Image (cartoon, rainbow, N blue to C red):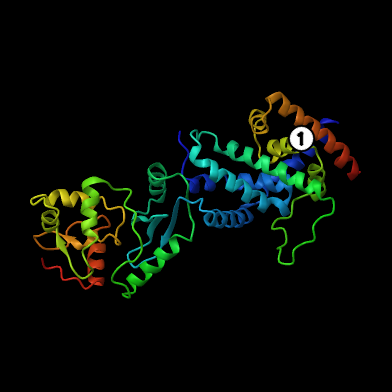
């Protein structure tokens, strides 16, 4: 199955990719990450021959861009001052404390948690996006949940 | 961790799936399309132009206007462009806006000739030759199928001209509505004879062959 027009690809998967990014890097960085994901996908698109699982393909790219975003954030410990014309984050996450805790997880656990619960993907696909086995994907989710319970659920008490 | 706690935590995480992201995703995507457009990553820019003869689907490549259709079945048109030109088909404005401007002027009666470039890469051979000849018929005039055939040194090939004109991928701008039957009347038109009549009236064409 050859890939559909990029326009159609966007209509089908745009929201899923944005949602993954929003919960993975936060609403502030999601727009920039989306743009980078979009450009990378568009560059690669003409060479794509298999259009059978484009959502996983797009999320794989988004995952890499999310890792880059987290890395560059790690390199600057002091947050950059807000630009004056920067609009407020478009969406407020439900339960911000929880998503703060998710943001502090190691990259693979964070991505595994978001892909499993927010993107609602089976472990097999989580593994394929994270470039690991299904068992390793389960393990990452399990460890992520355990850490969240320590960091977040216990704090709530 | 007890199962109940785990269920609570999982349920809290799953609430992320219910957040409505459509508006911010749309805004971010539009910004990304503009950036890609500036970088020249859009191979086929598509858009809709409103007109007195209904919404027009337009598609533009770096070489010019490649498709102008009345067909409301956008999906089929997009698939066709992706298969025949490039899958990098996007709703981008920089290439579509000049086309929109000229069409607006044409329908307002302020333009008789289109200056925009036409990309005939969806045509070939005889079809392209017929359409190139069609493109030379000025506004206000008509040519018969037979006259075009004679002009292309194929006298008697009126029917073959008709078939070629019927495949015109760039309606209005390549003015196949100016090709009419020798027997009188406006004849057939891909967008329906009413549209053909409207366009010829707009151009004050004398349709008596």
Residue B189 in sight here? no
- Is A138 left, or right, of B154 in this rendering? right
Q: Chain of mark 1?
A: A
* Residue B18 picture location, percent across and down: 67, 47
Which element type, helix, strand or loop, lies under badge 1? helix
The residue positioned 71% from the left and 29% from the top of the image is A137
Image coords of residue A102 (percent x, y): 79, 42
Q: In which quadrant of the rendered view does residue B17 lie?
A: top right
Query: Residue B134 occupies which quadrant of the picture?
Result: bottom left
Q: Residues within 10 Å of mark 1 (few under 14, many from 20)?
A: many
| Residue B189 on image: x %, y % | 23, 57
Give the left or right position of residue B27, taking residue B77 as reference.
right
Q: Which percent across, then down, holds residue A60?
A: 63, 37
- Whether residue B131 appears in this view of the structure is yes
The residue that appears at 76% across and 35% down in the rendered structure is A109
| Quadrant location of the C terminus of chain B in the rendered image | bottom left
Taking depth in this image into account, of B8 and A119 the one nearest to the observer is A119
Question: Is B23 drawn above or below residue A132 in the view shown?
Answer: below
Which residue is under mark 1? A109
Q: Is residue A126 left or right of residue B188?
A: right
Position of residue A44 relative to residue B93, above or below, is: above
Quadrant where the image shows the N terminus of chain B: top right
Residue occupying image coordinates x 32% and y 65%:
B53
> Taking A150 as reference, is A25 above or below it?
below
Q: How many marks?
A: 1
């Amino acid at each position: 199955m050859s890939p559909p027009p990029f326009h159609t690809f966007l209509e089908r998967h745009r929201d899923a990719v944005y949602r993954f990014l929003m919960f993975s890097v936060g609403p502030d960085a999601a727009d920039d990450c989306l743009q980078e994901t979009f450009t990378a996908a568009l560059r690669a698109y003409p060479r794509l021959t298999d259009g059978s699982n484009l959502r996983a393909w797009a999320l794989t790219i988004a995952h890499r861009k999310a890792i880059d975003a987290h890395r560059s954030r790690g390199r600057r410990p002091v947050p950059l001052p807000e630009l004056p014309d920067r609009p407020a984050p478009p969406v407020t996450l439900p339960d911000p404390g929880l998503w703060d805790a998710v943001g502090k997880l190691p990259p693979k656990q964070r991505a595994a948690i978001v892909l499993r619960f927010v993107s609602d993907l089976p472990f097999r696909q989580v593994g394929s996006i994270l470039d690991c086995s299904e068992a390793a994907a389960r393990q990452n989710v399990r460890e992520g949940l355990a850490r969240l319970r320590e960091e977040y659920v216990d704090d709530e008490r | 961790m007890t199962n109940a706690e785990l269920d609570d935590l999982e349920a809290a995480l799953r609430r992320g799936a219910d957040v409505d992201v459509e508006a911010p995703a749309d805004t971010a995507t539009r910004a990304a399309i503009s950036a890609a457009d500036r970088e020249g990553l859009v191979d086929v820019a598509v858009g809709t132009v409103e007109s007195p003869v209904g919404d027009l689907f337009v598609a533009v490549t770096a070489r010019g206007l490649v498709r102008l259709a009345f067909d409301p079945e956008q999906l089929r048109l997009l698939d066709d462009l992706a298969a025949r030109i490039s899958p990098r088909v996007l709703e981008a404005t920089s290439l579509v806006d000049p086309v929109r401007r000229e069409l607006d002027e044409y329908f307002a009666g302020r333009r008789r000739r289109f200056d925009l470039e036409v990309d005939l890469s969806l045509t070939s051979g005889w079809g392209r030759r017929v359409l190139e000849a069609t493109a030379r018929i000025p506004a206000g005039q008509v040519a018969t199928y037979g006259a075009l055939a004679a002009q292309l040194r194929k006298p008697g090939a009126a029917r073959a001209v008709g078939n070629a004109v019927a495949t015109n991928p760039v309606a209005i701008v390549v003015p196949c509505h100016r090709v009419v039957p020798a027997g009188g009347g406006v004849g057939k038109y891909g967008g329906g004879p009413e549209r053909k009549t409207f366009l010829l009236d707009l151009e004050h064409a004398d349709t008596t062959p």
